[in-house]
Amino acid sequence: MPVGTARTGRLMTAIHIDKKSGAGTRAGAIGRAEAYLDEGRFETDLARRVAIRTESQALPASRSELDRYVADEMIPSFKALGFDCRTFDNPVKGQGPVLLATRIEDKALPTVLGYGHGDVIRGQDAQWTKGRGPWVLARDGDRLYGRGTADNKCQHTINMAAMAAVMAERGGRLGFNAKYIIEMAEETGSAGLDDVVLAHKDAFAATVLVASDGPRATAERPTLVLGNRGALTFDLVCRLRDGAHHSGNWGGLLADPVVVLSHAIASFVGPRGGLRLKAWLPPPIAANIRAVLADVTIDGGNDAPVIDAGWGEPGLTGPEKVYAWNSFAVLAVTAGNPEAPVNAIAPYARARCQLRYVVGTKIDEVLPALRRHLDTQGFKAVDIEAVPEVGRFEATRTDPDHPWALWAITSFTATTGSNPAVIPSSGGGVPNHLFQTGLGMPTLWVPHSYPGCSQHAPDEHILLPVARSALAVMAGLYWDLGAGGTP
């Protein structure tokens, strides 16, 4: 079998690697990566991966598909690139496995850890209006539709192809050691991933994380993300009595739990979304954070919602609000029977709440401070309940002035001719705390989607110009990692 091919019942896309010579150029590697898309091989590989129904939210029915994605798709693909593969069973019962692919060229070289996830959210098959549904990759102009095109099958497909391009140009070498994680439970909160990685730290240890997930700031501009906001999820519950009572006979006599709960929330969040509790605020935004965000624009294109002017923390720019500050949202409210309301005062009301927070927030003080505030304001009837199945994920950030961040910006600029957008803390939820805190490494995220991609919704898609740009950026980045001179 030719070098760079593998079989799993069918011939996978060939990756041509010439081992006769180590000669090559950075431009050559980028050209090879772009040709992967231009010649249609990107669509071929992505179509095969999208067709595997890896819905981690549909367990246990989807478990065999999660296993199949790892065994039949990822392992042969990584082995074709000279990686050794090890699959870890997930310690959380019923959840999908964790794959670690490892390629060690020289122990003296830096080791780069990559990350992606092969699971997707539910297909929502009946709600698609574009393409051919979630499980068939469909092209419409510059758009490729299908579940996983943006999150995350496209993204690790791009990175794997970029590594293949560098190896082809360098005569079979990357020039650095590479490890790559593919997990199959990200859409269920990365269940079990921490346990697997921390129990096998030596196996997962690396110098730096270079990973891809989420959207760019704008479609046109490559983006470097250095961390993510954390999230603390909890319920506010107002229980006033056991049963509902007629709103005509008892209205004006019985307290309405929805009204009480609404006023309780309004006591700590202003009418335009500003936070009123001092304990919920992060430290002032650092000068270097403000500097990089001054060059960032939030623009999701025609598919994105219109930003509400004046919403959020007063005095901050849009990028500062979402990438460098804390925000509160009510995710859901229940009371009575919304589908078939009756003339009755509900006995209780519940609100699922979430605080998104940045590094520096004293997160352990958030709920105690809220409890004190509610008691002081006369809302002792409002209880705070933890949400164990959701819980929280930590805020993390590599400083924009960190040597690895500056190195990455230089690499981006060499490829594109201009500086990337730099986002200190993305809004999305990724397990960055595991890499930065658990494994102790700087983290560089290079997202390959765009804000209007319909991620987690029907009609999910990727833009082909973004994918082509991403292939070039990653080929340049991987080339530079193997060229020496890293931090």
Image (cartoon, rainbow, N blue to C red):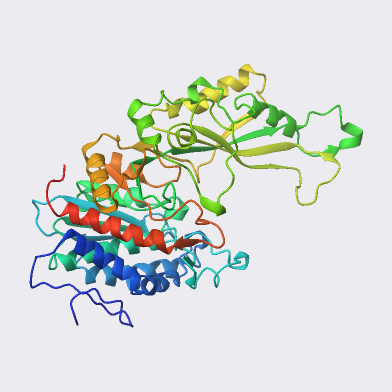
The residue sitting at 55% across, 63% down in the picture is 459
Taking 372 as reference, is 445 left or right? Answer: left
Quadrant in the picture for the C terminus: top left
Against 56, is 136 above or below? below
Quadrant in the picture for the N terminus: bottom left
Against 42, is 212 above or below? above
The residue sitting at 34% across, 58% down in the picture is 469
Which residue is nearer to you in this view: 286 or 189? 286
Q: Position of residue 222 (x, y in %)?
A: 36, 50
Q: How many marks?
A: 0
Residue 98 in view of the camera: no
Taking 338 as reference, is 13 left or right? Answer: left
The residue sitting at 24% across, 53% down in the picture is 477
Which residue is nearer to you in this view: 289 or 326? 289
Against 204, is 282 above or below? above
Q: Position of residue 364 (x, y in %)?
A: 44, 28
